[in-house]
Image (cartoon, rainbow, N blue to C red):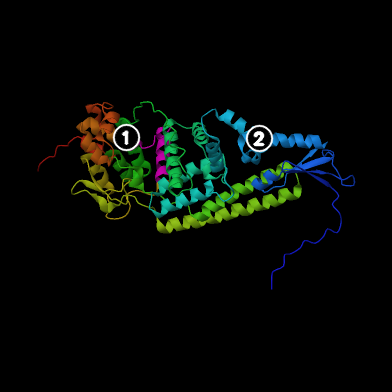
Amino acid sequence: MTPTTPTRKPRKKPRKQTVLDFKGWKIRRIAPDVWQSDNMGKFWHKDESTGKLTKKRERHYHESPEAAKGYILGKQAEYNEHGAGATALTAVQREECLQAYRDLAGRATVAQAVKFWTAHHPDGQAATLKEMVAAWIAEQTKNGHRPGTIKLNRQRLDGLMRAMGDDTPCVTVTTQALKGYLDGLACAPVTRNGARRCLRAFFQYCVDREIMEANPVVKIKPAKLDAKLPDFMTDKAVESFMHKLAELHPDSVPAFSIAFWCGLRPTEIHGQYGLATEAVTLAKKAVENANKTLENAKKRGKPRTIREAERSLASAREALRAALAEQDRKRAVDGVIGGLQWEDVNLRDGVIRVRPETSKTRSARLVNISPNLATWLLKYYRATGPVSPSPVTVKRHRTDVMKELKMKAWVPDWPRHTFATMHFAQHQNRDKLAAQMGHTGASGVLEKHYKGLATKEQAERFWAILPADAVKQDTQPETATQGA
């Protein structure tokens, strides 16, 4: 059998439009009974070439066949000059491209500008600040970073999310936006630099996980720091503080005596509590959101909505109280992380051992016990247990003493700075001071900071401070004994 050629079925109705071929284009006349809008003329043509490029049917309407032919001749001239791709863009789109070139002024190509815009305006699947901050904090916790370090990083990044929004995609955060955020912080230059280091580490984490192409913090310069002498307490101030502390809260005397005459860091002596539990963090967020909902409800002024928001806020606060109570119960069982133990205070050999798990630098070291410190510790010495009360208790004891002595403020790391100042004045040995303090940087930094702050005489008086009862015994006059 021979195949038969299929035949087209005849049209049921004759074509109403008259078709005119002109240079490969079709011009049709619209019949009078066909609906026309205000912007349609009596004739229109279909652009066949544009349909092949864009797969779209494009129509242009004209008042007469001559007008349609003139438009077609103009299109042909455009083809001859630019090729078939000339009609891939409309006249408006071509004008926009031309304006883009003018605005870029040679600084970048249109393709580069489009790539930048696409990278900073992703779809809804992009990783947000909230998601990546949670992932970074979780990884730091898993890797065993210090609780104090993790807490500080979380606080700094919480501030960033409040300023930019939790759901902001990480790739949309620019260098200029971060610079504006850092410059807007009401803090000292040292604090700003600390926030910058935290942001740089966080966004580098995002880059390493291919969330971002480049770290936006790299180009932000740290703030310049003015040379400033470290604060330290005079020998008279230390003596007054220690004697009053022994009078009011003797439990904290060993901790502060080691801080003044060994220069250990506060966390190395007192330890620190662990991070807030996830339940507490979520409960605090819920209270914050409930407060915002209540504020919005009050603005709308609908009583029913206000009552519902108030009930939600009360429920969130109750959940927060329960989470805090559970956290306190757990802390009471687990105790304080780190902190110096009496087992590490060796009065016989005259040294204190700082263990790696307690040290900030994660390295062990031995710190010498001065003769006057041995006198302070001998009075309060115990065989086992922590040397210091809990961090909260130590702070409360310190506040009581400051109130009695009418001290206005407590400078962070005050005892450690005092130790370094007096140690350098006494020994004039920066390497020995660095070893005692567990300082990992160049020892020349210590010399730059602490040299020339105290005199030799001040240092001698500082290293001779003793408990009040020991001073009385030393200064008590001898009494003559009568023989039989």
Observer-nearest of 294 and 6: 6
Residue under pointer 2? 78
In the image, what residue type sits under mark 1? His
Q: Residue at x 28, y 36 (%)?
A: 419
| Residue bounds of the magenta highlight | 393-416
Which residue occupies the extreme front position in the image? 2
Comparing labels 2 and 1, the label whose residue is closer to the camera = 2
Q: Counting residues from the N terminus, which is met first, the one under dot 2 or under dot 1?
A: 2
Estimate how packed mark 1 is, as few (under 14), some (14 to 19) or many (20 or more) residues with alpha carbons within 10 Å: many
Give the quadrant of the C terminus: top left
Q: Residue pushed farthest right? A: 33
Question: How far across and down, in percent of the image, does residue 133 sit?
Answer: 49, 48
What residue is pinned by disc 1?
417
Residue 249 position in % (x across, y down): 37, 44
Of residues 457 and 148, the one nearer the viewer is 148
Question: Please, what secondary structure does the residue beneath circle 1 have?
Answer: helix
Q: CA distance from mark 2 to mark 1?
A: 80 Å
Q: Position of residue 229 (x, y in %)?
A: 34, 27
Give coordinates of residue 84: x percent, y percent.
63, 41
Give the dominant element type of the magenta stretch: helix, strand or loop. Answer: helix
Question: Is residue 162 shown to the viewer in this render?
Answer: no
Q: Of the residues shown, which amino acid type is indicated by label 2?
A: Glu
Label 2 residue SS: helix
Q: Nearer the viewer, residue 41 or 484?
A: 41
